[in-house]
Image (cartoon, rainbow, N blue to C red):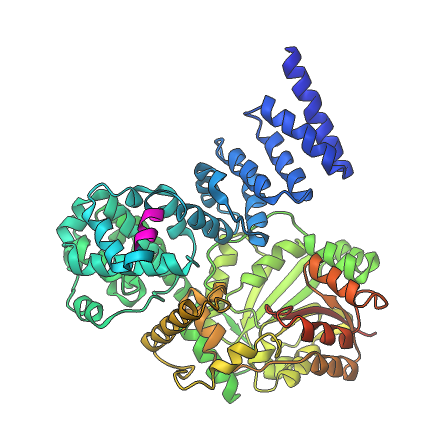
Amino acid sequence: MSKSAKAAGEFKRLGLQTLESGDFETAVKALRVAAADMPRDKDVRIAFAQALRQKGEVAESAIVLTEALAMPPASVEAARALSTLLQRYTIDEPDDLKPAGLRAALGCATIDHQPIVRTSLQLASRAGGLSAALAIAASEGGDAAARRMLDDRKAVVFRDELLRDALSSGANTDPNIERLLAALRRRILLDVSEADLLARKDLFGFCLALVAQLHINEHVWPVASDEADAIARFQPDLDALCRGEAAAAGSLIKVLLYRDVMTLPLVNWPSDAIARIRPKGLAHVIGPMIAARQEERALADGIESYGSISDATSQRVAGQYEKSPYPRWTSLTTGAPAVRLGEVDRVFGALTADRLREAPFDVLVAGCGTGHHVAQIAVAYGANARILGVDLSRASLAYGTRMVRQYGLDHVTFAQADLVDASVIGRQFDIIECIGVLHHMADPLAGWRSVLGLLKPGGLMYVGLYSAVARQALAALRNETDYPEPGCSDDAARTYRASLMARAEASGNNDLVRSQDFYALSDFRDLILHESEQQMTLEDIEAFLDKESLAFAGFSLDATTLERFGRAFPDDPLPGRLANWAAFERDNPQTFEAMYCFWCRKND
């Protein structure tokens, strides 16, 4: 071993030791040297990135992780660390991130892709063809930018592999990119012949990414009247497609840019017929979409039901989610099992957490929707947890069943039930998680009381409720003259959403369009057009806890907010009194923008 290699190894050992001991300053210095001297050692870079994050150097940590990911084969550990980092932080200047590393992360099936998508699109918008197109759109309008993109037969933007991968992997949440892509879609429909669309390989590949993006966001972009008229005239030759005639694909792609494949007869085709579609790239994009929907339809029939849905509000809410299951999640970070028991340890103490580690325990997710939260906690609680997710919507439950099977979470089951009378479930649970459902009931507190009847003595409950303070602006929209009815058509929802986006652009108030739930149709309905929504105050919650003998155990908030509360109320140690939290919220009205999410415990 050379002296330089030996020295690098010593720096690596020192860096790993000091990282483990919590001396992050020394760890960063040592691992920086080791990373420079050992450029092909992925483990050094992953440890270096961890030390940088612990030291607060977030942007450099992300850069180092993308460097590690760019070394094949892609490291799942690095991809998971990058997704977690980007979930929490925004990189203001992402230019030094490695595109190859971001693409490798998007290819990892066991991480949440959405944070990677957001950052990848941010990077693409600052460099290359997309950056130039966005600049033209800003000065001359989206239509002019789209025309120039299509006039350039060698447009770099259509060959941008990171941009394509990002659009195919998660929802775009940048309004400027959306406006440009919507203008491009329009010009493709109106100006590009089907033959030319197929002949221009780069444009064809980019259109496939647009088809994937529009499937992800449920065609949430608005449609102008000339687009609607034009697309109504397209009738794809399905027989020719089934025979594998590539010439028939051009019109289908145009249709898929405006209508979901699930609305077409192809949704009933068997897999071998889909596989015959040419070009193969089109079959590869729509085949998994169709297979997923077919699997969900088959699964829906086998879902168990507890009782019936007779409450009028519950029926309306069930109807919304039958039509628009929410959220339509497509990726999940797995790994690090049983981390939620660490949270239980911090909140309730080691005795409670150890009891859950030692023997199987039962968890109810009341109002589980499409199972995203179920899947997250199935990993986070570990294999000892026996998890039941219940919801009003059979379509949502079928979606959830398909997804948890995809991730091999075999300790999860789903059933249909109305929480108005949760007693029909006929079981008791060690832990109940009820996030984002009670405020959609006609009487949230009655619903909470109904669910509470299923909690064992001494059991734990994790609750999420809308804040009346944080949602004042959203609630005010319902009183405006242009507010459509919650059950409005998809076209009306798209038109209303477009008006809100235009209003935000004109006013400079981007609070609403910063919400990730603004960028898919079912998410938008859940955010603004819900069939039933009630908001709560901390005074309401405190009164209920007192009446039902529940002990408040603390909010799930970031460390910075908890520190600010501690400075504001130094004589009130965490979890803090709810009266003080109410005062804190009045001074900081967006504290609970995501909901009041908190733990409580049923007294023995």
In the image, residue 55 sits, relative to residue 17, either above or below, namely below
Instruction: Examine the structure image and report whether residue 448 is included in the region drawn in magenta.
Output: no
| Quadrant housing the N terminus | top right
Q: Which residue is situated farthest in the right direction here?
A: 571
Q: Along the line of sight, which residue is nearer the eye, 261 or 156?
A: 156
Give the residue drawn at x 63%, y 70%: 592
Q: Residue at x 46, y 45 (%)?
A: 106
The residue lying at 80 percent from left, 68 percent from top is 569
Q: Note whether 39 is above or below 238 in the view shown.
A: above
Q: Position of residue 596 (x, y in %)?
A: 65, 71
The quarter of the rendered structure image containing the C terminus is bottom right
Residue 244 visible from this viewpoint:
no
Left or right: residue 474 compared with residue 522: right
Q: Is residue 250 above or below residue 52?
A: below
- The image quadrant that residue 252 belongs to is bottom left
Q: Report whether residue 300 is seen.
A: yes
Residue 403 point in image, percent of width and height: 49, 58
Q: Is residue 134 magenta?
A: yes
Residue 601 placement: quadrant: bottom right
Q: Which residues are magenta?
A: 130-136
Image check: 427 left or right of 143?
right
Q: How many marks?
A: 0
- Toward the top, the furthest residue is 2
Left/right placement of residue 490 relative to residue 116 reads left
Q: Main secondary structure of the magenta part?
A: helix
Q: Nearer the viewer, residue 600 or 38?
A: 38
The picture quadrant where one finds residue 64 is top right
Q: List x then y, in percent, for residue 271.
A: 30, 53
Residue 163 spot, x, y in % from top left: 37, 47
Name above or below for residue 233 compared with residue 542. above
Left or right of 526 in this view: 565: right
Query: Depth check: 187 or 386 in front?
Result: 187
